[in-house]
Image (cartoon, coloured by chain):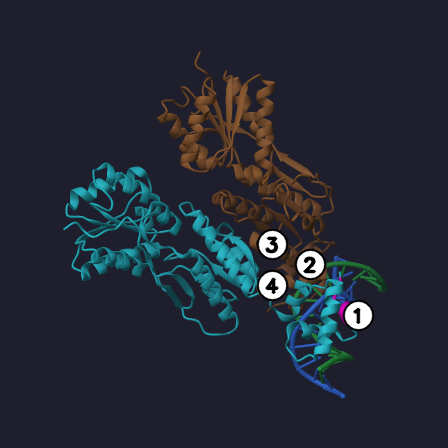
Chain colours: A cyan, B brown, C blue, D green
Amino acid sequence: MVKITDVARLAGVSPSTVSYALSGKRPISEQTRRRVQDAIRDLGYRPHAGARALATSRSNVLALVVPLRAGMHVPVVMQFVVSVVTAARRYDHDVLLLTQEEGDDGLRRVADTALVDGQVVMDVQLHDPRLPLLRNLERPTVVIGFPSSPQGLTCIDLDFRAAGEVCVDHLAGLGHRAVALVGSPPEVYVRQTAFAQRVVQGFTGAADRAGLQSAVHPCEATPLGARRVAEQLLREQPALTGVVVHNEAVLEPLIDAFRRLGLSVPGDLSVTAICPDDLAAHLGVSAVALPSGEVGAQAVELLMDKLAGEPVPEATLLRPTLTRRASTALRDA
Amino acid sequence: MVKITDVARLAGVSPSTVSYALSGKRPISEQTRRRVQDAIRDLGYRPHAGARALATSRSNVLALVVPLRAGMHVPVVMQFVVSVVTAARRYDHDVLLLTQEEGDDGLRRVADTALVDGQVVMDVQLHDPRLPLLRNLERPTVVIGFPSSPQGLTCIDLDFRAAGEVCVDHLAGLGHRAVALVGSPPEVYVRQTAFAQRVVQGFTGAADRAGLQSAVHPCEATPLGARRVAEQLLREQPALTGVVVHNEAVLEPLIDAFRRLGLSVPGDLSVTAICPDDLAAHLGVSAVALPSGEVGAQAVELLMDKLAGEPVPEATLLRPTLTRRASTALRDA
DNA sequence: GTGAAAGCGCTAACAT
DNA sequence: ATGTTAGCGCTTTCAC
C-alpha cells in the first residue's frame, strides 16, 4: 500500500505538505502543489480511510436506516435510498445501509464506534419506539417523517396536510361541491402514522373552508376494499363528484370500480391522488407526488449542516405540488 | 469518548489485556475477563472503528453496488440488498451502498482507501464494461451474474439454463408436446444479458432432448407486445399447449391475451414462468423463482471465504426450483 | 497469564 | 510557504 510518506518522499516534501496540498487547508506554492500531484498520480496514492477517520474523528460515512415493513411501497423506498446516496456523494460522503430489523442496536453500534458521522432514519412514526434513542445518539440525526413531537429532533417530510388541502382546492377550483377522501387501511390510522392523519386534517380543513360537503373513508388495500368503498360512497354521498385517494394500492381498483358502477372519470367523478408519481402518471391521475428524491436530498443537506455545526430547523415540510392530468375536470353544469 | 485505556485503568489491567479480552486471541483468566467486561459495561465502551481499521487493515465493511437501470424489477433488487445486509451482519460486517451511476470510480475509491474489505457487484452483464476493473481491484470481489468468461472472477447466480430446462421438463412431464418460450424484449438479447440467453439454451436443449416441438419468441414488455406474441403463437404453432414465460412484465398481460383468444389456462394452455416469486404466487403461475435472498446470502459467504483466504469456485450456480401452481396441468387427452 | 511499547497512516498544532 | 512532531485509538509483537 502506498502511503503519504511515499508521496512525500517522491515529491521531495514533508508528509504534512502532502496532506495540506490534498486538503487545501493552507496555502501551497504552485510548484509544490504540482510536484505533489504528480507524485500522487504516479504512485496511485489514496489516503487510508481508517487512518483519516482516526486523525480527524470524521469517517465521511453516514448511516441510512431503511424500513422494510410490509405495505411499504418498495420503489419509493429505493428512490429515496438512491437520492440519499447521490446527495451524500455531493458532500464526499458514503452511505452505510442499516435495516430496520437490526433495530436500535445497529444505530447505536455505528454511531458509538464512530463508523458513521451521522444518520438518516426513514419512516419515523408518530409514537416511534426509537424516539428516545434518536434523541440521544452521539451523532447528528435527521429523520424522515414526523413523530408526535419533533422537539429535539430534525424532521423532514412532505407537508401531507398541505397535500390534502391542495387536492381539495384543486377540486373546489373545478367547481366540485361534494368530496370524499379515500384513505389508508384502518390499521394505518390505528398505528397513528402521522402522515395519514395529516392528510385527513388538510382534506377536512380545506373542504370546510371551501364550504364543501366532505367525508373520509379508510380503505383496505385490496380490490375488494376498493369496490366496497366505491359503493359506499355512492350510497352515502349521492352528490359526490370529487375524490381524493391517499392509498396507492387501491387507486387503480377504485377507478375501475367507479367505472363498473357506471361512473366515468373524469366525466362524472374527478379523481385526485397523493401517491408515487410514476403510478399517477401511469394511470393518468392528477396527483400530488411523494417527492422521495427531494426529501432524501434535503435530509442529507440538513445532516451536513448539523455536522458543520450550523443550526437547522426542527421541522422541514416540503411544499406539495399537484400535477394535473386527465382524471380531473370541471364539474358538469 | 471512552477509549480502551479508560477501560484498562478502571479494570486495573493493561490496554492489551482489554484488547485480548475482547478478541479472545489469547487466554485470559476468568477473573480478569470479568473485571474487563464489567469495566466495558460500566463505561459503555465501544472500540473506535477507524482506529481498529488502521491497526488491523480490516474495516469490517463491504461494498454493495446496486444497479438502477430502467427495467430492473425494483422489489427484487431491494430483496437482494436486504439479504446482503443481513448476511453481512452475521459475519459482523456492515454494508456500504454504491450506485451503479457512480461507476468504476466509486468501486475504486472505496477499495483503494480501504474503506471496505471487499465488494459485491450486482447485475454483471455478459460484456460488462466493468470487467477489467473487477478483475483488478485490490480487494476480493463477488459478482452476481455471469459475464462471457468468469475467469479470474467469482460469480454467482441462479442457473438460468437449468431454470429453462426445469420448466420444459415440467411441461413435458405433464404430457405437452409443443412448447414455446416467451422471452425478454429484443434489446435484452442484443445487450447480451447472459441470463436471457442461458434460459433460451436450457429451454431449447430440454425441448430437443424430450422430442418436443419448440419455438422462442422475444417479447416487448408491454400489453400490446404480449397480445401480438399470443396471436403469433397460435398462428405459427397450432399444436402449442405449453408456454414458458421469462419476462415478468408480460406474464399477466399474456395470460390475459390467451384468455381473450378463447384459450383457458391451464385447460388449453399450461403456463410456467421464471420470475420473482411474489408475482408468480399472485398470479397463481407455476414458476421458477428468482432466489434473490439466497443469491445475496451466498454472495456474502463467498466473499467472506475469500477474505479468509480460502479458495472459492469461480462459478456458483444456484439450482432452480419450480413451484407448482394452478397454471399448469396434464395435457388434455 | 499479563504488560510495555511499537506501530497502523494520517492530520494539525507548533515551529521556523 | 514548508517541516517536525505529537497524537488519533487500537492491535500485536516481544518480553516476562
Q: Considering only vertical position in the picture, is B176 above or below A99?
A: above
Chain letter belonging to callout 4 = B
Disc 4 crowd rating (10 Å Cα; few below 14, some 14-19, many 20+) is some
- Tell me the SS state at disc 3: helix
Give the mark toward the camera: 1 or 2. 1
The residue that disc 4 covers is B45
Disc 2 residue type (three-letter): Asp
Residue A52 seen in render: yes
- Residue A97 x, y percent position in the rendering: 54, 54
Disc 3 residue type (three-letter): Gly
Chain letter belonging to callout 2 = B
Task: Count the marks.
Answer: 4
Q: Spatial distance from mark 1 to mark 2, Cα to Cα?
A: 20 Å
In the rendered image, which quarter is residue A253 located in?
top left
Point out the residue furthest to the top here: B333
Give residue B112's mark: 2
Query: Which residue is painted at 66% across and 67% down in the image?
Result: A52
Specify which label sits upstream in the sequence, 2 or 4: 4
The residue that disc 3 covers is B103
Q: Spatial distance from mark 2 to mark 4, Cα to Cα?
A: 30 Å
Disc 4 residue type (three-letter): Tyr
Q: Which residues are magenta?
A: A2-8
